Amino acid sequence: MRTSAHNGPSPGPAARVDTTDIEALKRELERLRAVGSRDRGWLDAVLEYSPHGVILCDASGKLVLHNRAAERIWAGSASTESINDWTLYRAFHDDGRPYEAKDWAMARAMSERQVIESEETRIQRFDGTYGMVLGSAAPIIGPDGEIEGGISVFADISRLKQVEAERGELAAQLTRQVEELDRRARLTQALLAVSTALSGAVTVEQVSAAVVSDIHRVLGASTTMMYTADEAAGVATLVGHSGLEEQRASPYARVPLDARLPLSDALRERRPIWVDTRQSLHAAYPELAALRPVRDDVKALAVLPIVAHAALLGGLAFSFANDRAWSPEEREFLLSVAAQCASALDRARLLEREREARARAEMLAAELERQQATLRLLSEAGAALSGSLDVASRLTHLTHLAVPTLADWCAVDMLNGDSIERVAVHHGDPAKIELAERLRAMSPPRPDAPAGVSAVIRAGRSEWMADIPDAAIESAALSPEHLRLIRSLGLRSYVVVPLRGRDRTIGALTLVHAESGRRFSQADVALAEELANRVALLIDNARRFQEAQSLIRALERTNAELDQFAYVTSHDLKAPLRGIASLAQWIEEDLSDKLTADTRHQMDLLRGRVRRMEALIEGILAYSRATRFREKPESVDLDRLAREVVELIAPRPPARVTLDVPPATLRTYRVPLQQVLMNLITNGLKHAGREDAAVSVSAREQGDRVEVSVSDNGPGIAPAFQEKVWGMFQTLQARDKVESTGIGLAIVRKIVESRGGRAWVESDGKSGATFRFTWPRREEAEGAG
């Protein structure tokens, strides 16, 4: 590095060189000053005449320069000492917050050491007006890398923004005009389409179908509903809707005309109601929410009455999810639709009256023809029922005669014990007969049913319904699918009359109207009862004849079997047994001194087997005679009889038998009842399997019968064996362990069932068993009546 020679020794050659360099440097400095002055002039000229505003600040943030364009754009200027004083200039974020000093683009450019380009900023000029500038900012960095200042260049784009806004508004206006023209065109087309559709509508349903869906779509409504009005009944009925789910339509199905509701007011006062907003809806109808649920998306409404020749025919109701300012064109359109609906409904009403009059005339003619056919049917039925005693074929023939003359369906049900059996059914469609049988299998008639076949048989009185209400069908359904199947039969009206035998109701005759649309009257009930009387007479005669024949055949078979059985038993079994017993005794007497203890034991077993076989034979003979009695019915005190049986059995203590039998007097056969009690009590003592066996006997009255129970404290009977024990020769324990023939319970059941009773056992299989049987309180002598 060269140094100055002003204060050193006398100059030498080197000093001369330094002086020359200094002079050169001076000349270069002067030249650079001249160039800098010229460049500064050019820069000042650029800043002075530039259309863009320029502001410079130094490293401390002090504004050191702004050009004339900056003053023009800002309508003034302000000098600041530091960046913190930049708040003299006012600008705003998009959300309206004023700029802080750190928010300016030039401040951010200096702090972040990066260029901020093309940033739009809303400003407030010094004269109080507002504008929009588009600017960029950059830091000024010296050769040493340090920030020496910052520069901001910006242009006023306020007019450009204004032009853009005006252009957008013009475009929006044009769009609205196009949409308005399109909407008017759609309204016109919709009105034309509705007019065309209504011109061919001849029913209320067709009028509704022609209006609801098209207008709903054109208006963009949330819901559209059409009602018919009945001023006499004071109610409006929903006949068509769109935009409303079926399950949500039920609250709107029937609207009272005297209610404080938009629809009620419009129809009652015969004036249209226009609601623009939800607020105005609640203001006009503050009680609406309490009377009827209002959907959250309902904000605007239009309700119009349908009036023709001063008569109220119905109404139209539209709801919208958005606020809606009803234009004159829309109001005129909906009023035109309502007027056309009025004409169509009036025409449909007149046509409906004409159809009804024609239908009444046809119905009267059909009724006359039906009555004539009924007379023919009774004559044919009499001939059909007077033939053979084949009940099933005769009843089937009868149901075919009844359909369709008397009804669309005909069925005959018979009482079979505790159940009801369908013996004949007919309908014109075999598929529906199959469906009806499926439904009957799904829900068989209950004996305690409050209505229908069971109730008629139980009460012996006819039941009929001119119109089957839907509520009755719904209450009979077990599930939605079951309800659908029932409704598919189309049942409209029914008559059920009892089939009365000589001494009781034996069944029911059912007639049903369905697809024919006919209804039963009181006259039809009388006719059905007359037909039922003839059917009952046939059935009763045939049944009595069949029962008599069956009893005769059964008795003959039983007697033959018993005679043969007794013969085999007495001749083929008893004689050899007596021989075996005698032979065993002789052997024992002849060889008494030679018999060992084991041999004597074997002889005892042999005699035991003989005695068991003799008991078995006696049991079989008793079984064969179990239902044949020579004596006559007599008065039997059940409690006294039970005590006598216990005395005969004489259980050995600690075994005991306790009685809890009410003082009931029976008119019955004494011996078989005594046999049943003895067998059951003996069975309980024998099979208890313990010395302290305890048997209890009780009884209770059940209408025309008594139920007797015999309980023990034995090991019980498993459910799997509770039916098996009633069979012949059936025992649950080895015969070597418990002496038993396995016939006693079989005799019990045979005797009980021969008296029309029932015998059964109850046990949990772990401890104790209870044998029960029912016995008639009064019996007639065999062959009486």
Image (cartoon, rainbow, N blue to C red):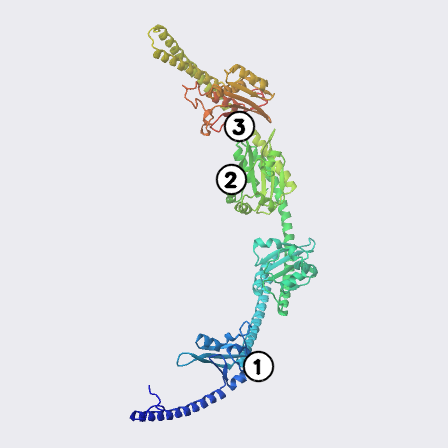
Task: Nearest to the eye among marks 3 and 1: give it.
Answer: 1
- Residue 546's disc number: 3
Seen as rendered, the residue at the extreme left is 13
Using the numbered discs, state the Cα–Cα distance from disc 3 to disc 1 in whole angstroms. Answer: 123 Å
Camera-side residue: 459 or 518? 459
Task: Nearest to the eye among marks 2 and 3: give it.
Answer: 2
| Residue 191 x %, y % | 59, 66
- Which badge, 2 or 1, is on the more N-terminal residue? 1
Pointer 3 local density, CA inside 10 Å: few below 14, some 14–19, many at least 20 = some
Q: What element carries label 2?
A: helix
Q: Mark 2 points at which residue?
A: 441
Q: Name the residue under label 1.
A: 126
Q: With 730 as the anchor, is 201 left or right in this view?
A: right
Quadrant for the C terminus, please.
top right
| Residue 454 x %, y % | 58, 36
Q: Is mark 3 on a helix, strand or loop?
A: helix
